[in-house]
Amino acid sequence: MKMGIYSTSRRTTLYFCENRPSLATIPNNRIRKKFRKNRKQHSNKLKIELPSRIGDQFKERFYYDLHTLLEAGADIIQSLEILQKNAIKESRKTIIVHIKSSLVKGGSLYTALQSRKEFSQFETISIQIGEESGQLPRVLHSLHEYYKERIALRRMLFEALSYPMFILFTTLFIVGFMLVVVVPMFQSMFDRMGAELPDITKLVISLSDFLSNSGVYVLLAIFGLLFLLFRARKNRKMKGQLQYIFLRLPYLGNLQRRGQTYRWTQIMQLMIESFMPLEQALQLSNKMITFEPLNRELEKIRMGIHSGIHISDTMEKSTFFDRGLVAMIQVGEETNKLADMFARLNAQQKEQIQFQTKLVSKILEPLMIVLIGILVGFILVAMYLPLFELSTVVG
C-alpha cells in the first residue's frame, strides 16, 4: 500500500496512513516540535477530507492546514503541494492546483484566490493585507478561527432547535392521522346511532371533513407559501421587509439581532487584526452581511467615519445596537484597542446566543409535549363524549 505523500523539499516530508497523519521526518528539531504542538491541538485535521462542495468546513480545514504547514517551516508552494496530494475530491484538488499554478507563475496568494469564485472578497483582501504586512500565517489562523466559529454556531443552533422541530412535525402527523383516519371511523358509528352530538364533537368532525376533502389544497397552499418565501429571499426589497418584520417578533427578533451582531463583531475583529483600515473594514463587512436592518446601520457608520465622526458616536444614534456594546466600542476607540474590544464583544454575543438558544430549547421541548397531549386529548374526548352520554342514557 502506498503511504507516502511528500513535498519536493528535503526539509519537509510528511507521511499519512489512513486517518492518522504522522510526521515522518523533519530534520529541523525546532520545526518538528512546533508542528507536533500544532498537530496535537488540531488532531486529524491535516488529512483533508474535502466535502462534495466548497463550504465553511472546507475553508476551515484549508486555512488551518495552510497555517500549520507555514508555521512548520514549509513555503507556500510546498504546503499547497502537500494539500493537493492529500486531497480526496477531484473538484477540491482542482482548486488547490489552480492556486498553486498561479503562485508558480509568480502571482500572489491573494490574486490566486481572487480568481476563484469560491473565495469571497473578505477572504482575498484579508490575505492581501497579510501578504503585504508579512502577517500571512496570522491572517490564515484568523480565517480558520472565523470559519470554525461559524460552523460551531450553526451546529449549536441546529442541536438546540432540531428536537423541538421534530416534536412539532410529530405532533402535526399524529393530529393529521387522527383527523383523517380515526375520526371518520367514529363518525360512521355516530351516523348509525343517529344521536345528537355535542358541539365539541361536531367541531372535530367538521375539521376532519375539511382535511379529508380539502387536504390536498391545504398542502398546496403551504408549499405555495414556502415557494413565495423562497422567492422573496432573492428579491432584496422583499427580503429586507421580511427581515424587519422578523426583527419585531418577541424573543426571536432579539435572538436574530444578537446573531447578526455576533457575525459582524467576528468579521470586524478579523479585519482589524489584519491591519485593514476601519472604513474599508466596515465596507467589506457590510457586503458580507445580508441582513438589511444591519446593512443600513453599517452604511451610516461608514459614512460617519468618512466624515470624521467616531464609530461609537454614530452607533449611539442607532436602535439596532445595545448600549453596552456601544460603550465597549467607545472604550476601544479611546484606548486604541478596537480589535480586542471586538474580540470581547464577539465572545459576549456568543455566550448570550448559547444561553438564549438553550433556554428556547428547554422551554419548547416540554411545551411541544404538552401540546401533543392537549390536542390528542381534545380529539379523544370529543370522540368518546357521545359514547359516555349514550351509556348514561341507557343506564
Image: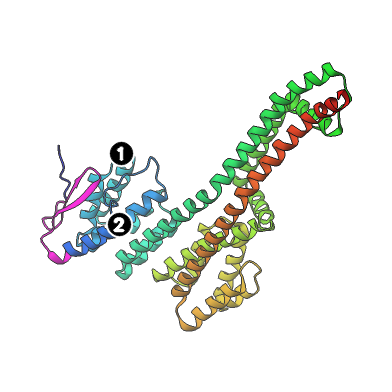
Question: Residue 328: x, y in percent?
Answer: 53, 77
Q: Quadrant of the C terminus?
A: top right
* Residue 21 against residue 196 in the figure, above or below: below
Question: Residue 210: x, y in percent?
Answer: 77, 28
- In the structure shown, which secondary structural element does the residue marked by tag 1 occupy? helix
Q: Which of the two residues, 53 or 220, is positioned nearer the viewer here? A: 220
Q: Range of the magenta residues?
A: 7-31
* Residue 388 against residue 371 in the figure, above or below: above
Residue placed farthest to the top in the image?
192
Instruction: Check disc 2 and give the amino acid type.
Output: His
Marks 2 and 1, how far apart at CA: 24 Å
Which circle marks residue 90 in the picture?
Answer: 1
* Residue 71 against residue 275 in the figure, above or below: above
Tag 2 residue: 42
54 part of magenta stretch: no
Q: Could you classify mark 2 by the number of other residues whose Cα lies within 10 Å: few (under 14), some (14-19), or many (20 or more)?
A: some
Residue 108 makes an appearance in the image? no
Which label's residue is closer to the chain start, 2 or 1? 2
- Residue 196 lies left or right of residue 219; in this view the side is right
Q: Could you classify mark 1 by the number of other residues whose Cα lies within 10 Å: few (under 14), some (14-19), or many (20 or more)?
A: few
Which circle marks residue 246 in the picture?
Answer: none
Q: Which of the two residues, 285 or 344, is positioned nearer the viewer here? A: 344
Residue 345 makes an appearance in the image? yes
- Residue 157 lies left or right of residue 96; in this view the side is right
- Residue 216 lies left or right of residue 79; in this view the side is right
Question: Residue 62: x, y in percent?
Answer: 32, 52
The quarter of the displayed image where residue 257 is located: bottom right
Instruction: Check disc 1 and give the amino acid type.
Output: Glu
Give me the residue at 43% from left, 67% from top. 271
Q: Which of the two residues, 325 or 94, is positioned nearer the viewer here? A: 325
